[in-house]
Image: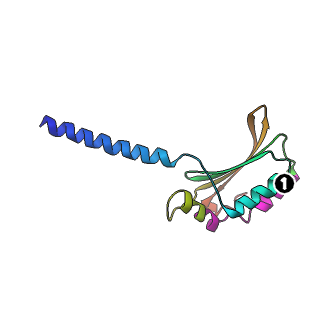
């Protein structure tokens, strides 16, 4: 009887370890390679005074970080948003979700962050969170 209990506990522990490993190994941020976003990145880096731009997937969201030494003007931010709007749509987000998460899944959120970067410290000064529920149109 005691052996059965020990084996049951061992099997439960192994299953729980497998579930924990599966969960944590898939939530690590993954750099996103997507043609439209790569073109957007190039456009922003060459057109504006932006030092660095990170685009990555961390379940269940896509993150776009725009890092610059100084805050971008309202006009520059508006231009960047207009350039990004046609890319952030259900079809493209489903493609990214299928590639980096799971087949037939959808991204819940798209986070667009504008950061001021000084002395290796990033300070977020503007953030947009777009939701799948509103078809990523809640700018």
- Quarter of the rendering occupied by the C terminus: bottom right
Label 1, residues with CA under 10 Å away: few <14, some 14-19, many ≥20: few
Q: Which stretch appears magenta?
A: 75-94
Report the residue that reaches farthest toward the left.
Answer: 1
Question: What residue sits 85% from the left and 46% below the top?
Answer: 72
Percent of width and height locating residue 98: 54, 62
Residue 99: image location, x then y, percent: 56, 61
Residue behind mark 1: 46
Q: Which residue lies furthest to the top in this view?
A: 119
Q: For the point 48% across and 44% down, which residue is it?
A: 24
- Label 1, secondary structure: give it: helix
Left or right: residue 96 versus residue 126 is left
Does the magenta segment cover residue 84? yes
Q: Is residue 108 left or right of residue 121?
A: left
Whether residue 27 appears in magenta in the rendering, the answer is no
At x 21%, y 40%, the residue is 7
Secondary structure that dominates the magenta span: helix
Side of 46 relative to 57 (left or right) = right
In the displayed structure, would residue 6 be above or below residue 101?
A: above
Position of residue 30 measured from the top left corner of the image (x, y, whole percent): 59, 50
Q: Residue 42: x, y in percent?
A: 78, 56
């Amino acid at each position: 009887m005691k052996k059965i209990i020990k084996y049951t506990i061992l099997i439960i522990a192994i299953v729980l370890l497998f579930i924990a490993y599966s969960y944590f190994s898939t939530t690590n941020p993954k750099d996103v390679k997507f043609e439209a976003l790569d073109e957007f990145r190039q456009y922003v880096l060459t057109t504006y005074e932006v030092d660095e731009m990170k685009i990555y997937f961390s379940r269940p969201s896509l993150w776009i970080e725009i890092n610059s030494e100084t805050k971008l003007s309202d006009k520059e931010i508006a231009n960047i948003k207009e350039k990004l709007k046609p890319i952030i749509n259900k079809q493209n987000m489903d493609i990214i979700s299928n590639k980096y998460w799971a087949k037939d899944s959808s991204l819940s959120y798209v986070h667009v962050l504008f950061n001021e970067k000084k002395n290796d410290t990033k300070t977020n000064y503007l953030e947009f969170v777009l939701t799948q529920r509103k078809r990523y149109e809640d700018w």
